[in-house]
Amino acid sequence: MENQTENKETSANQLVEDNNENNKNNNNKKNNKKKFNRNINNQLETTKGVLDNAKEDQSWLSELKLASFEPLIDLGRSVCSKCDKKRKYFCYDCCIPLGDISKVPLLKLPLSVDVLHYPTELISKSTAIHSKVLAHDDVNFLEFPDEIPNYNVDETILLFPSDDSCFVKDLDFSNIKKVIFVESQWQNAKKILRSDQLKGIRCVKIDMQKTMFWRYQSHGDSYLATIEAIYYFFKEFHQNQNGGQYNGEYDNLLYYYAFFYNLIQTTYKEKNRDFLRKDNYIQ
């Protein structure tokens, strides 16, 4: 009888413990769901704030003739039709836009572009990828050192501010068919530039500009994000070919860049958010 009583008490206690554990798990699930919904709502509010920030923005980005950000506002993570990976806004592996592609401002470039990518740089953080997404047929993304071809030095130029480089606005583009950009941190760029395939290629440079890049860097604000350099090159190329005139023909090269800038600024300005603030950058 004593054993039966003990067994009943043990079973009863176990039931109570199991019930408490179930209640705890259910509460955790409810809390996690609330937290998830709260995070989603915060993300939606932040994303929708992009349009307001873009209207109030006083930087040079606000002067660009860009396509509307509206198609990006409610765009969540979606599956890439080529690789089946979940990505947001565009797939940086396949270099294709996501969402309604008909609303993405695709471009045609007057020169072929090669972006030489240093292998340790994360593709997901590359701004040069934006050019491949937006001008897919005219941009080649090549890995250093294995994918760098042998170039025709008479038809190719390299954007790099070397001692003997000339300004884009002063160059004769009669025979130029391709322009090369380097996508790497500054200390790795020289490794790429020393490669045999780039020997003899003329270097060109753009006018001094101020970056709007949101990721802190120690070199100063004259060191541009790669997509900024690509944009300024084609802007100055167009001016070179059209008597100094420019009417926003290549502004949409900065479509994603400007969107992300406004998204970061919107988050940066939110109340009750703590950031390490350093000269207008978020670190």
Image (spheres, grey):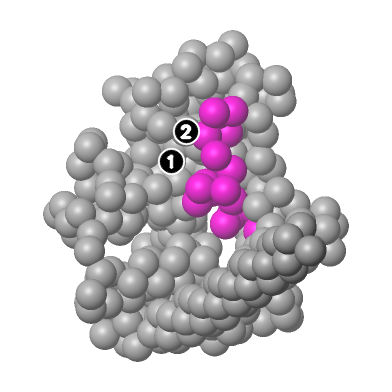
Find the residue positioned furthest to the front. 1
187 shown above or below 129: above
- How many numbered marks, from 0 up? 2
User: Residue at (76%, 58%) from the top-left corner?
Assistant: 3
Left or right: 94 with respect to 161? right
Residue 80 in the image, given as x and y percentages of width and height: 78, 62
Q: Amino acid at mark 1?
A: Leu
Q: Quadrant of residue 270?
A: bottom left
Q: Is residue 149 visible to us here?
A: yes
Which residue is painted at 48% across and 41% down in the image?
172
Q: Earlier in the sequence, mark 1 or mark 2?
A: 1
Residue under label 1: 171
207 relative position to 183: left or right? left
Q: Is residue 97 visible?
A: no
Q: Name the residue: 57% across, 57% down.
A: 130
Residue at image coords 56%, 20%: 198
Which residue is identified by label 2?
184
Q: Tell me if mark 2 has few (under 14), some (14-19) or many (20+) residues whose alpha carbon lies within 10 angstroms of its own.
A: many
Assess whether residue 276 is covered by the magenta stretch. no
| Closer-to-camera residue (34/82) | 34
Dot 1 and dot 2 residues touching (CB under 8 Å): no
Residue 119 lies in magenta, yes or no? yes
Q: Nearer the viewer, residue 231 or 215?
A: 215
Name the kind of residue labelled 2 in the image.
Ser
Q: Which residues are magenta?
A: 117-133
Quarter holding residue 89: bottom right
